[in-house]
Amino acid sequence: MKFPIRPSLIVTALVLALLPLAMPNNYIVDVAVRIALAAVAAIGLNLLMGFAGQISIGHAAFVAIGAYGSGIVTARFGWPPVVAIAAAAVGAALIGWLIAKPILRLQGHSLTMATLGLGIIVNIVLVNEVAWTGGPDGMPVPPLQVGSFVFAKVLHWYALACVVLFGAIVLSLNLYASPAGRALRGLHGSEVAARMMGVDVARFKVRVFVVSAVFAAVSGSLSAHYLGFISPSLAAFAHSVELATMVVLGGMASTFGAVLGAALLTALPQLLGGLHGYEMVFFGLVLMLTMIFLPKGLVPSIALKLARRR
């Protein structure tokens, strides 16, 4: 598999590398780490929603599976965190594969409701399995350690989060330009037409669902070790809606749109915290205006306007 060097990737790498120089304190760096980790999950969900056109409002379940999978085996069994993160990703891939076939036979509202049910089931399990998950109160997670090196400083985490985010962007862009990406986009346009062109619709749906689940699980695992604490709210319906909104707000089928959507939805609540209860009203107004005036999402709509001006 080839990974072509694109100007956008070079710019992205430079921005990620130089951004800490413009950050005045560790609080801003902390927000940047949260944005990067959320963007990884959003990019994965964009593969499912933006590329393949399969709507999911239960994808936070896989974030929680990654977080709790890594947290439980490190805290309860003493596994090395790196091994635990890999095991959680494999576990999420297996669960995604097991449920993808029956769920992805559905379409439209039925598919949406099925993915919602997945998130509800995972949330209930996390709340009730107190001995393993800590129940509603959550559980602490050991810090990330690779050999003798412990990721203790926020700048360490920023570097790691940026490397993972950059890898996710490269994989997403490469998939978009590949024959598999063209098949997924054809499936998004019309499943009947894709079948007529020889696309194995069921197989591609399952594959993109599994890949999307792995992205979410890695994001959840890293977030768990970064924050040092996890709770069942990771699998809550509100978190799933937030992930889907990141994709829609930034622009469906746009990798950088998913990153921008994650940045806005993660940073805006922090920036609007001084409105004393009205921050969500302003936040909702921003979303409404974006959907009214930029219906394709921020990145595709802005790119289209610039192209028309040229």
Image (cartoon, rainbow, N blue to C red):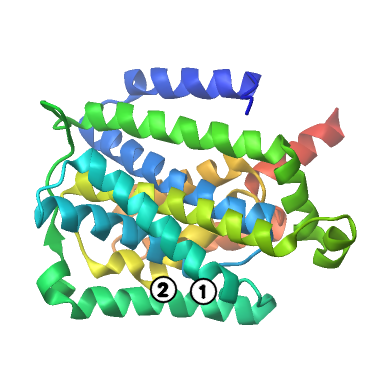
Spot occupied by residue 219 in the image (x, y as percentages of width and height): 37, 48
Do we see residue 63 in this rendering?
yes
Do we see residue 248 in this rendering?
no
Answer left or right for 57 relative to 125: right
- Residue carrying label 2: 119
- Secondary structure type for disc 2: helix
Spot occupied by residue 18 in the image (x, y as percentages of width and height): 40, 17
Q: Quadrant of the N terminus?
A: top right
- Three-letter amino acid code at disc 1? Thr
Answer left or right for 236 relative to 71: right
Q: Quadrant of the C terminus?
A: top right
Vertical relation: 12 (above or below) 68: above
Using a 10 Å C-alpha cutoff, classify the residue at mark 2 as few (fewer than 14 neighbours), some (14 to 19) or many (20 or more).
Answer: many
Residue at 10% over, 54% down: 77
Find residue 301 and report its image quarter.
top right
Q: Foreground: 256 or 62?
A: 62
Residue at 32% over, 26% down: 159
Find residue 308 and report its image quarter.
top right
Spot occupied by residue 296 in the image (x, y as percentages of width and height): 71, 53
The reply to whether discs 2 and 1 touch (Cβ–Cβ < 8 Å) is: yes
- Residue carrying label 1: 115
Spot occupied by residue 176 in the image (x, y as percentages of width and height): 68, 40
